[in-house]
Amino acid sequence: MSIGWYLAVSAIVFCTGAFGVMTRRNPLVVLLCLELMLNGANLSLIAFSRMWGNGDGQVLAIIVMTVAACEVCIGLGMIVAIHRRRLPIDVDELRELQG
Amino acid sequence: MSAVLFFIAAIGVIAGAIGVVTFSNPFYSVLALVGHLLSLAVLFLLLRAEFVAAAQVVVYAGAVMVLYVFVVAYVGGEEQSLDGTLTRRSRSRGADGRKPTGALFAGVLLVELLIALLGSGLKAVSGDGAPYAPGPTTFGTPAYIGNLLLTRFLLVFEASSLLLLIAAVGGVVLARRRGGLGEDDERDRLTPLDLLRPRGTGTMVEGVEGLALAHARGVGELEDESPAAGGGGW
């Protein structure tokens, strides 16, 4: 399979994740859609790495996975803290920082 | 063979992604993401990224998704704030126009990405990639990745370890109980294990409050004889 097919799949996955981030209101699902976007980026990184026969893209993909794990840790911690304070689990309702 | 496998895995990847976005129950979204990640690992294997595929399955589809499932089980039991049950406030703010607008932006982004992809001047995009010869230390094997991580990308590696440490501390700080230990009603619940346990054996309650205070609250009061004063069975 040519590399372009992989890049097309990665573009579709990235846009699906972006759509989810923009439309869903449950922060858990927003985090899941962020994972989708990161995975789309990862797939294109690895496809380009295969294209040039160079391992840098794979190392970068592993670093992206690390950052995604950190993001999940912080995000889920925030969701648990919001739930403990009996605040609504809804990104439209949580708008105190909006001013 | 590789083309058939690619199309099966690509369909799995895209179906999983659409499932994550469209399921209204977050638990099903998490399960769809697990399917998405497993299919994506197949694509990684087709791209000769063996170590990344293994890490994807173990770290993402294993550990991170288990964390998600726990939090969904903890938080999402109330079935609140799912799509389709718009509250009055968000409806009054015109949140109904969010879905078409989001679809429009995502569609525009997809068209732009595909134009950039199809109109690319890179000849290698339509090729199969660089020549590949299987071997113990070729491209994509754990030895190759480890060598790169510990030589050329050592600074990145250390920075990511620091990031993980900060995230772990931040997760603990964010998710801890607030308001002190005394206000939590879960601690007043007696379990059968509390009655069977001899006093002074070093439970968390005794460790936090001190032996005398813990037993003044009746944790071990059903026992006939107590050991020597002061306990100290740590």
Image (spheres, grey):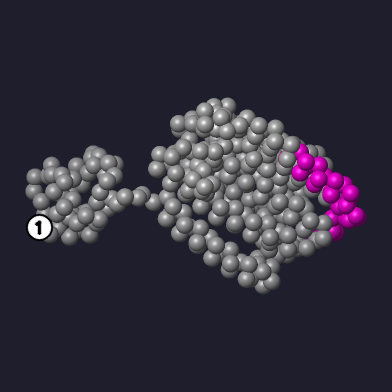
Q: Pick the residue in front: B51 or A21.
A: A21
**Residue B122 is covered by the magenta coloring:** yes
**Residue B42 is covered by the magenta coloring:** no
Residue A23 at x, y = what percent? 63, 37
Classify mark 1: helix, strand or loop. Answer: loop
Which residue is tagged 1?
Answer: B228
Residue B100 at x, y = what percent? 70, 32
Q: Is residue B157 above or below residue A67?
A: below
Quadrant for residue A18, please give it. top right
- The answer for which chain carries disc 1 is B
**Quick check: can you spot residue A75?**
yes
Q: Is residue A91 above or below residue B225?
A: above
Give the residue at x 62% y 46%. A34
**Number of disc labels:** 1
Q: Please report the bounds of the magenta region as a residue range.
A: B106-135
Give the residue at x 25% y 40%. B189
Residue B104 at x, y = what percent? 74, 37
Quadrant for residue B221, please give it. top left
Q: Pick the residue in front: B216 or A80.
A: A80
Residue B183 at x, y = what percent? 27, 46
Q: Amino acid at mark 1?
A: Ala
Give the residue at x 24% y 56%. B207
In the displayed structure image, the side of residue B186 where residue B103 appears, left or right: right
Q: Is residue A34 above or below residue B166?
A: above
Give the residue at x 58% y 63%. B160
Q: Pick the residue in front: B147 or B181.
A: B181
